[in-house]
Protein backbone atom coordinates (compact mmCIF):
# COMPACT_ATOMS: atom_id res chain seq x y z
CA UNK A 1 0.00 0.00 0.00
CA UNK A 2 1.55 3.28 -1.01
CA UNK A 3 1.79 6.25 1.33
CA UNK A 4 -1.02 8.29 -0.20
CA UNK A 5 -3.36 5.32 -0.19
CA UNK A 6 -2.56 4.57 3.46
CA UNK A 7 -2.93 8.23 4.48
CA UNK A 8 -6.22 8.66 2.65
CA UNK A 9 -7.87 5.58 4.09
CA UNK A 10 -6.23 5.42 7.52
CA UNK A 11 -9.05 6.97 9.56
CA UNK A 12 -11.48 4.56 7.94
CA UNK A 13 -9.21 1.52 8.43
CA UNK A 14 -8.16 2.40 11.99
CA UNK A 15 -11.53 1.44 13.47
CA UNK A 16 -11.47 -1.96 11.80
CA UNK A 17 -7.93 -2.61 13.02
CA UNK A 18 -8.95 -1.72 16.59
CA UNK A 19 -11.88 -4.15 16.36
CA UNK A 20 -9.57 -6.96 15.29
CA UNK A 21 -6.87 -6.12 17.87
CA UNK A 22 -8.52 -4.55 20.91
CA UNK A 23 -5.17 -4.22 22.72
CA UNK A 24 -3.94 -1.61 20.22
CA UNK A 25 -4.02 1.92 21.59
CA UNK A 26 -4.66 5.19 19.77
CA UNK A 27 -0.92 5.87 20.07
CA UNK A 28 -0.17 2.54 18.35
CA UNK A 29 -2.46 3.53 15.50
CA UNK A 30 -1.39 7.15 15.14
CA UNK A 31 -0.51 7.89 11.53
CA UNK A 32 2.10 10.58 11.02
CA UNK A 33 3.26 11.84 7.66
CA UNK A 34 6.54 10.20 6.70
CA UNK A 35 6.46 7.66 9.52
CA UNK A 36 4.76 4.80 7.71
CA UNK A 37 7.50 2.32 8.57
CA UNK A 38 7.26 3.22 12.26
CA UNK A 39 3.51 2.55 12.15
CA UNK A 40 4.05 -0.82 10.45
CA UNK A 41 6.73 -1.64 13.03
CA UNK A 42 4.36 -0.97 15.93
CA UNK A 43 1.67 -3.06 14.27
CA UNK A 44 4.14 -5.89 13.66
CA UNK A 45 5.13 -5.95 17.33
CA UNK A 46 1.53 -5.97 18.55
CA UNK A 47 0.07 -8.41 16.01
CA UNK A 48 2.99 -10.74 15.28
CA UNK A 49 2.38 -10.35 11.53
CA UNK A 50 5.08 -9.56 8.98
CA UNK A 51 5.03 -6.24 7.12
CA UNK A 52 3.79 -7.98 3.97
CA UNK A 53 1.03 -9.73 5.91
CA UNK A 54 -0.03 -6.39 7.39
CA UNK A 55 -0.07 -4.65 4.02
CA UNK A 56 -2.18 -7.45 2.52
CA UNK A 57 -4.50 -7.48 5.53
CA UNK A 58 -4.94 -3.67 5.54
CA UNK A 59 -5.66 -3.67 1.81
CA UNK A 60 -8.43 -6.22 2.39
CA UNK A 61 -10.18 -4.00 4.95
Image (cartoon, rainbow, N blue to C red):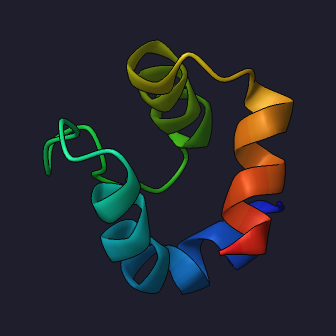
Q: Is residue 49 above or below residue 39?
A: above
Q: Is residue 22 above or below residue 59?
A: above
Q: Is residue 4 above or below residue 30?
A: below
Residue at x 83%, y 60% (from the top left corner): 1
Give the total of numbered labels. Answer: 0
Residue at x 41%, y 71% (from the top left corner): 16
Residue at x 41%, y 59% (from the top left corner): 17
Quadrant position of residue 52: top right
Q: Is residue 21 above or below residue 1?
A: above
Quadrant position of residue 36: top right
x and y percent of residue 29 in the render?
A: 31, 49
Lateral position of residue 14 relative to residue 55, left or right: left
Quadrant position of residue 58: bottom right
Lateral position of residue 45 relative to residue 1, left or right: left
x and y percent of residue 40 in the render?
A: 57, 33
Residue at x 84%, y 52% (from the top left corner): 56
Lateral position of residue 37 relative to residue 26, left or right: right
x and y percent of residue 15 in the render?
A: 31, 74
Instruction: Name the quarter where the C terminus is drawn.
Output: bottom right
Amino acid sequence: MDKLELKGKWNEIKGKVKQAYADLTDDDLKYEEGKDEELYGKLQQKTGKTRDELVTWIKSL
